[in-house]
Amino acid sequence: MNTLAEENYLKAIYHLAVNDGNASTNQIASSLNTKASSVTDMLKKLADKSLINYIPYQGVSLTPSGEKIAIGIIRKHRLWEYFLVEKLNFKWDQVHDLAEEMEHISSEELIDRLDKFMGYPKHDPHGDPIPDCHGRFDTHELKPVSAVTVNEGGTISGVRDHSSSFLQYLDKKQLTIGCKIMITDIIEYDHSVVVQTGNKEVHISREAANNILIAL
Amino acid sequence: MNTLAEENYLKAIYHLAVNDGNASTNQIASSLNTKASSVTDMLKKLADKSLINYIPYQGVSLTPSGEKIAIGIIRKHRLWEYFLVEKLNFKWDQVHDLAEEMEHISSEELIDRLDKFMGYPKHDPHGDPIPDCHGRFDTHELKPVSAVTVNEGGTISGVRDHSSSFLQYLDKKQLTIGCKIMITDIIEYDHSVVVQTGNKEVHISREAANNILIAL
DNA sequence: TAAAAAATTTAGACTAATCTAAAAAAATAA
DNA sequence: TTATTTTTTTAGATTAGTCTAAATTTTTTA
Ligand SMILES: [Mn+2]
Ligand SMILES: [Mn+2]
Ligand SMILES: [Mn+2]
Ligand SMILES: [Mn+2]
């Protein structure tokens, strides 16, 4: 099928192109910790395989077959993350790097059986949607806590920052996926936010508020 | 750590050297479906890393650190095979190739947690012993059915041929790991064997009898 | 709109892993 | 023990993926 490097490029392009549908050489290079010249080489290879639309100097987008592969890898990544947390009791801040490796296990049948074994979960430990075996997934809108007004609230359903340090910080503050929260105050001075969670009140920075996503 | 190719070479050398402690270039080449010249190149690399003892023209053996790596890979291979059969309901003839890929997932912690999750199984679906996290495993003697006399019997505890076709054949004859059997007759003409299993009697060739291992 | 800066591609080199063909060493046979 | 065969190693190429440095194109700034 495709090499490990090709799969990583397709996935990176998919994530970068979610917004404007287009990814630049430098964006890809920085997201894969590689050099722009290496990216150019690979873009030619992927274009030859009709997995991306590549116009030199103009950036790239995925073709339908490229997108199908990318979504397949994301499906595997998120299912393995779910497995690691739900079955092997890893913490949500420990699983990403492991899943980066496991997402390249090639068997479709394996991943479909894993999906069934776990009861067809809809979201990974970070709240991200898990594509089903046809590549479909829900894409409901979430709001960053920083965009919510006082006395509004909702359920924590996602994060924008997936770094271990941020996830550990959320654990400590008991702000995890599924928690119902209510914004009780916004400090004018630094835009930090006071949040009611369960019986506790916690105080978080504007930056943290910007990286926590809730469903209203 | 080590590359995928290096891991495969170490594992191949381990399996080949089980008997006489030594593996030849050609043996390694044929077990990895590669050419002798490629093997020579890799042997130099592994010797540089002190993972094998290599004397040109004399074959190789694993050093203690090479053996430790090889056993670690075999542990992963067999634990994943167990997982695939016990948790994902694959058949015993479907899991080897999948495990060939999964055995290279690098995390030790992952495999130790998987081991715990499954209750520290001692044998894989083919009866082969699973090394524990220290690399220890039991090595009790098994006898091929072809070496057993009439009216003797025991429990099927291993196979020498791991091919899908042989495993499917055993499934069909209901000769699977854990079955208690008794040899009721040995045909003089072709050394084929009549075996009592449960309430049935099955007739198997000398070759098949040679590839079924029992504990007395 | 011309100059400067930034982004991207090209040129040329490197490593890991593989191959074929030829040379060398070891094992076997006459 | 010499000749033949088999095994193993060496020599020289190839492919995927990466790099640095230089050239080119695009974008921004003045
Ligand atoms: Mn992840
Ligand atoms: Mn995730
Ligand atoms: Mn196997
Ligand atoms: Mn096995």
Image: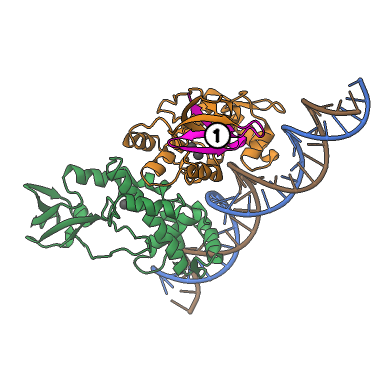
Chain colours: A orange, B green, C blue, D brown
Q: Nearer the viewer, residue C4 or A156?
A: A156
Q: Residue at 41% x, 39% y: name it.
A: A82
**SS for callout 1:** strand
Q: Give, as a single range, the part of the protein colored magenta.
A: A187-216
Q: Tell me which corner region of the image, top left, top right, bottom left or bottom right, holds residue B109.
A: bottom left
Work out whether residue A163 can be spotted: yes
Residue A48, compared with residue B114, is above or below; it is above
Q: Nearer the viewer, residue A130 or B148?
A: A130
Q: Residue at 34% x, 53% y: name it.
A: B115
Residue D23, compared with residue B213, is above or below; it is above
Q: Residue at 65% x, 39% y: name it.
A: A30
Q: Nearer the viewer, residue B78 or A187?
A: A187
Q: Which residue is mark 1?
A: A194
Horizontal placement of A21 versus A175: left or right? right
Residue B50, compared with residue A147, is above or below; it is below
Where is residue B95? Give x, y as percent. Answer: 33, 44
**Residue A196 is inside the magenta segment:** yes
Subunit that carries the residue with mark 1: A
Q: Is mark 1 within 8 Å of ligand 2?
A: no
**Residue B63 is inside the magenta segment:** no
Q: Tell me which corner region of the image, top left, top right, bottom left or bottom right, holds residue A5.
A: top right
Q: Residues within 10 Å of mark 1 (few under 14, many from 20)?
A: some
Where is residue B26? Give x, y as percent. Answer: 44, 60
Horizontal placement of A137 versus B138: left or right? right
Where is residue A189? Give x, y as percent. Answer: 67, 33
Q: Quadrant of the C terminus of chain B?
A: bottom left
Horizontal placement of B47 versus B203: left or right? right
Where is residue B83? Give x, y as percent. Answer: 32, 46
Work out whether residue B12 can be spotted: no
Q: Amino acid at mark 1?
A: Val
Q: Nearer the viewer, residue A196 or A77?
A: A196
Residue A202, compared with residue B204, is above or below; it is above
